[in-house]
Amino acid sequence: MDILRTLYYRLSPEHRFWIRKIYYFPQSIFSKSQELVPPKALIYTGRGDFLQQGRDWCLFFIENGLSADHRFLDIGSGIGRIALGLTTFLKGPYEGFEAIKTGADWCTQNITPKFPNFNFFFVNLHNDLYNSDGLDAASYTFPYETDSFDYACAISVFTHMTDDEVDNYLSESARVLTRNGLLTATFFISDQTQNIEKSNEGQTFVFPYEYTHYFLMDKKVKGANVCFKKDYLFDIIAKHGFTIEKYIPGSWRGIPSQNPLAFQDVLVLKKN
């Protein structure tokens, strides 16, 4: 699997997308499509049951402070996994922005007509895993007014960003959230001071390349997967005015998690 992943990362972002479309083409042809579920070949966010994961995240948000009338921001809205899970609950406005045009377009064409309070848009951001071109996420300003949202999420977003990018996104998240607003975000977090090597027993994800604030899975594709050093990450979380309400370690370490959603580490943050 490590060899296949390495070969996959050697492809350009555009070629990775086409490889996925070709791989899943037979399944897309012969499987019965479900209403409001994108074709398998287009789904680039996570594994498992696409709809059920969205529903499970919705329940998690509710358990951790989301109300039906909240204004919700989905940072990196993908191809609608989180949005679809929220459609039967959220009555307030939903805004999602996404760096892959295919995802934003599919959501706009398929979700918004049925749920007008759900709005999506594409922003051309550079990421060497997904997009060879675009704006720098380390300086990108979210296109929303200050105090615009009560709840935000960033699921499998910060795991593909380096330190300057995460620093900026946490700053922007704090700006657009109201006081006591909540942010649920996933990370890979390490409290080790040395490289996370393959020798770690039970390790399912490996980050052998060390930098000042983080470890990388692949040094040629930094956005592939990024694991942050815990002290650094928690310091910048506090710097931007957040307190950590909940920390659920993920099962990526090879240790079962208390929450089936938590393959990655899950943080619930509150804006002071």
Image: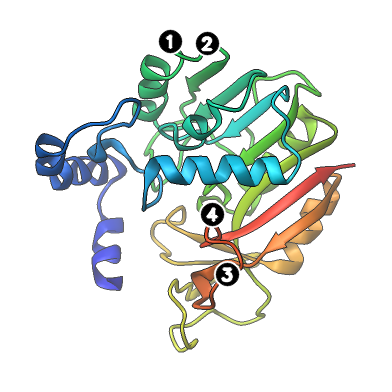
Of the image marks 3 and 4, the number of the one nearer the N terminus: 4
Mark-to-mark CA distance, 3 and 1: 37 Å
Helix or strand or loop: what does disc 3 sit on?
loop
- The residue wearing badge 1 is 113
87 lies above or below 198: above
Which kind of residue does numbered mark 2 sit on? Pro
Give the class, few, some or many, for how many residues have Cα within 10 Å of label 3's Cα (few <14, many ≥20): some
Mark 3 or mark 2: whose residue is earlier in sequence: 2
Q: Nearer the viewer, mark 4 or mark 2?
A: 2
Does residue 227 appear left or right of residue 202 in this picture?
right
Q: Earlier in the sequence, mark 4 or mark 2?
A: 2
Label 4 and label 2: CA atoms lie apart by: 30 Å
- How far apart, in angstroms, are the residues tagged by discs 4 and 1? 31 Å
Label 3–label 2 contact, CB within 8 A: no
Asked if the residues shown at circle 4 and circle 2 are in contact, with their CB atoms under 8 angstroms apart, the answer is no
Residue 138 - label: none
Q: Secondary structure at mark 4?
A: helix
Q: Are marks 1 and 2 in contact (CB under 8 Å)?
A: yes
The numbered disc on residue 116 is 2
Q: Which mark is residue 257?
A: 3
| Comparing labels 4 and 1, the label whose residue is closer to the camera | 1
**Label 1 – label 2 distance at C-alpha:** 6 Å
- State the residue at coordinates (35%, 26%): 36
Q: Does dot 1 land on a helix, a strand or a loop?
A: loop
Q: Is residue 211 above or below residue 76?
A: below
